[in-house]
Amino acid sequence: MPAIKTGGAIGAALLLAACGGGDGSGTTAAAPSAPVTVAPAAITTAQASRFLAQATMGATRAMIDAVVSRRYEGWIDDQFALPRATAHWDWLVANGYNVAANINAEIGFDVTMWRQLIAEPDQLRQRIGMALLDMLVVGIGGVNLNWKQFATAAYVDVLLDNAFGNYRALMDAITTNAAMGSFLTFLNNRKANATTGAQPDENYARELMQLFTLGLYQLNMDGSVKTGASGAPMETYTQADVAGLARVFTGLSLASSVSTTPDRYRQPLVMNAAINETGTATFLGTSTTGGGMAAIKVALDTIFNHPNLPPFVSKQLIQRLVTSNPSPAYVGRVAATFADNGSGVRGDMKAVIKAILLDSEARSDAALTSTTAGKLREPVMRLTAWARAFGATSPSNAWAIGDTSNQSTRLAQSMGRSQTVFNFFRPAYTPPATGIASAGLVAPEFQITNEQSVVAYVNYMQALVLNGTGDVKADYSAILTKAADSAALVDEVNLVLAAGQLSSATVTAIRTAVDSVAATASNGPQTRVNIAILLTLASPEFIMVR
């Protein structure tokens, strides 16, 4: 196929495929109700594929059949029961990346990330881990440590290890992680110095509240913003709260001074009493004194029990998995589960994941005809959808996909490579001067979507579909059996990649393109398969997740 040199039609289609659902912020809280779940008498393959687009890094035919057989909740329980895949850290060690020559390199990080996202069976854990990485951001380029591939891998392992645990335990784990300590500059954070006037670094204290747990404004349980008598949003915290919390996050240091191996970056940070603030620290209506890990526990407990935490975290998880603009009722239902899993436990991630994925707004087919439901599929997840659907492997274990964050030649995104704590895209981003903005909706992933990135994506995926990269290649043997029948071919690609959501016009256009190449022509079957896959990957119905 010729290289695609213009993205006009596809770009227009992307803008027409507006994300969304819900009516934005309000000032009145909707009373949280019990989660509304949908349990159809039978699950179709298209419904199963749609579910997997939300719950995994990409559907496979085998997983579609498993969801049909086990039903949604049974499949989720099966995923909960799977053992954790080989940790990124352990895989890097086992494959020899901890040699002295790599002490100041990033080599190995992209390799293990792509391998695990594409090849490992614990797909729900992988998907939740990447949702958390979008929210609790660390980017390898901003980790100012040696062995940064190991340090960042250890951070991703923290997210994956805690994906099915409790959000409070996750807060502990990221706070005592070396990569996070470096990325948000609280590693070796020192108490105030009265002589020089130096104050503790406030970076982590601020971002922990603003981005990871509470947000800027007070929220109702349905995610709507509370307003004061003047109608202005009510702030969640003040600068005094930031300064007080910063006093708590002093003294955290590496557990070892040995730098010739990466091992210290896997160990939790420890308290260095010499630089820790032991005086009184006041924040969010709470005070603590004495410093040390006890003060950190008080701080994290206070934040964890703040009323903003359930709706703030729940809404962002819904945005990452299901829809950019969940209704207040949807947010309220999930937030209620976050606050209490039904057994008095707050922050139970398993319960929250089920509440998100089994909710009527996630499972009802009504979303397929809604003009406001769904989200733009993250670029990385477009690649992994292709790779998983068609069994991509790397026999040498090199997984030579690399850094895909270049917007001119690749995907404009690469997991673990955000340059700032604000991620590649913000949860409240709205593309200006669009129908999305006029409708009062948000579309986070559009922040990295423009004409240049759209063209780059299609051209990059064309190269992967046709030739792979290095020894990373798809296995088209199964789909090639349908190559002679354009209807069967396009239907199967449509099902696995796009959950059967291609419009009749798109299906007709793709079939016409497929049939322009004779099945009996030299390399005809493979060319027909390539056309069907690439045009599906470029279609707005695939690029949207509904």
Image: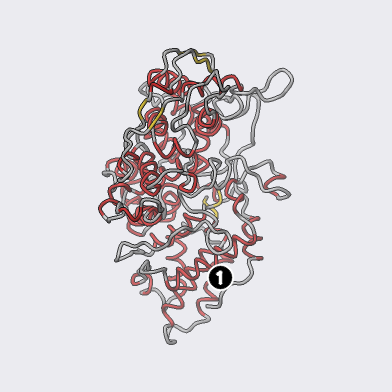
Q: Is residue 30 above or below residue 264?
A: above
- The scheme the figure's colours follow is secondary structure
Q: Is residue 479 left or right of residue 369?
A: left
Q: Position of residue 81 (x, y in %)?
A: 27, 41
Q: Residue at x 36, y 64 (%)?
A: 392
Q: Residue at x 56, y 20 (%)?
A: 241
Mark 1 is surrounded, within 10 Å at the Cα level, by few (under 14), some (14 to 19) or many (20 or more) other residues, namely some
Q: In this rendered view, identify the residue nearer to me: 64 or 466.
A: 466
Pinpoint residue 71: horizontal percent, then vertical percent. Answer: 35, 46
Number of numbered discs overlaid on the protein picture: 1
Q: Can you say whether 199 is above or below 323 in the image?
A: above
Q: Camera-side residue: 329 or 381?
A: 381
Relative to residue 159, is residue 417 drawn left or right?
A: right
Q: Amino acid at mark 1?
A: Thr
Which residue sits furthest front? Answer: 195
* Label 1 secondary element: helix
Residue 389: x, y in percent? 39, 61
Task: Give the vertical position of 192 relative to 329 (above or below).
Answer: above
Query: Image quarter for residue 220?
Result: top right
Q: Residue at x 50, y 27 (%)?
A: 309
Q: Is residue 211 above or below residue 157?
A: above
Q: Residue 286, position in %: x, y?
A: 50, 13
Mark 1 lies on residue:
508
Compare residues 47 and 170 and report the one nearer the observer. 170
